Amino acid sequence: RKVVVEGFLKLMTNHSKYSRENAWTEGEQCDIFTKLVFLNFDKECGAYAPMQQCISVFFDVYSMLHAHTYQIVSASIVLTVKEAVRRELKPRVFGQLVRFLTYLVQRVPAQDKDEVVGIQQKVATSLICEMKMQASEETVWEEEEEQMEQIIPALLKVLLKLDVQQFNQDAVKIMQVLLSELPEGNKLFGTKEFQSASDTFSVGDAAEGEVAPDVQKQASLVYDQYLAMKSQQDQAPEEEDAPEEEEPAEEVEKENEEEAAADTKAPVEHKSPVRRRRALRSRNVVS
């Protein structure tokens, strides 16, 4: 297992040296990076010192190698947080993972500063759009509500660690508009952390509640683009069905006769699968 893990670590570290034909896509790199993050918190891995050491060295340097590796780390944040919630990690482990992500997002490469700032702007926009998307559903299942209560605070912690002072002011105005559109009645947006985020992104007229129509239009366009991107990601590629070989007519007739004979022997009792009860909640109802 150690050899396999070391292989993936080396491939990720030296990925920029490969030709486009032999390289992974950004999505594939994010998937692998996410798996490596969870491997870093794996008890079995932690018990084996050589493997843990390899992974620790990788995370210490990966995000700082160049702008592309920092882009992979940044693009994996939402994916990692949602996967952690899906796995139902213990609160202590989940908190450690979120702190680990905030640590990684602050380890920026020394070169390509302008490109890194652009990446952080995209990350901030994605985090805000994800929070808005999570909170915009009027009716959700109870377990989805519980997941949202974990996801949004985690994303806020990462958002607060980004260097907003370096951002383009026009981009910050758009982010402020998106933040202002989050539902005020939701308890998740009544925290000190959310207020701190709102204050950080408050600039110009948006800070006073006045938003220029063109800025509002740009914010709506950014959010619509994010929803479209998420929709494409959620749609799994449809596998083409392989053509089935036709069976000889004699064999088909024989199988039909055997099935009919079996049906006359004894009735079969079909049991419905046991399903977990799901409670549907509406966010429009005040409890």
Image (tube, rainbow, N blue to C red):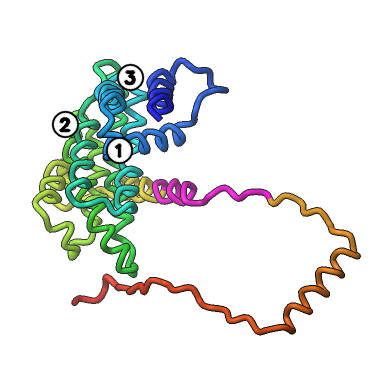
Q: Nearer the viewer, residue 218 or 256?
A: 256
Looking at the rendered structure, the kind of residue marked 1 is Glu
Quadrant in the rendering for residue 12? top left
Asked if the stretch drawn in magenta spans residue 190, the answer is no
Which residue is painted at 17% across and 57% down in the image? Answer: 189
* Numbered label attached to residue 165: 2
In this view of the protein, which residue sits in the foreground, 79 or 110? 79
Q: Where 121 sits versus 115, above or below?
A: below
Mark closest to the chain's N terminus, 3 or 2: 3
Closest to the observer, 74 or 183 = 74
* 242 on left or right of 162: right
Amino acid at the residue labelled 3: His
**Alpha carbon separation for disc pair 3 and 1:** 31 Å
| Magenta residues (range) | 225-240
Is residue 122 in sight in this rendering?
A: no
Q: Give percent across and percent down for residue 116.
A: 29, 25
Q: Estimate the x, y position of residue 225 in percent, counting from the top left.
A: 42, 46
Q: Within 10 Å of the Cα at label 3, are there few (<14), some (14-19), or many (20+) other Cα atoms? A: some
- Give above or below for 18 relative to 104: above
Quadrant of the rendering where the C terminus is positioned: bottom left
The residue where tag 1 is placed is 44
Q: Going 30% across and 23% down the picture, which residue do you hit?
A: 54
The residue singled out by tag 3 in the image is 66
Q: Is residue 59 above or below residue 272?
A: above
Residue type at tag 2: Gln
Say whether residue 264 is visible. Answer: yes
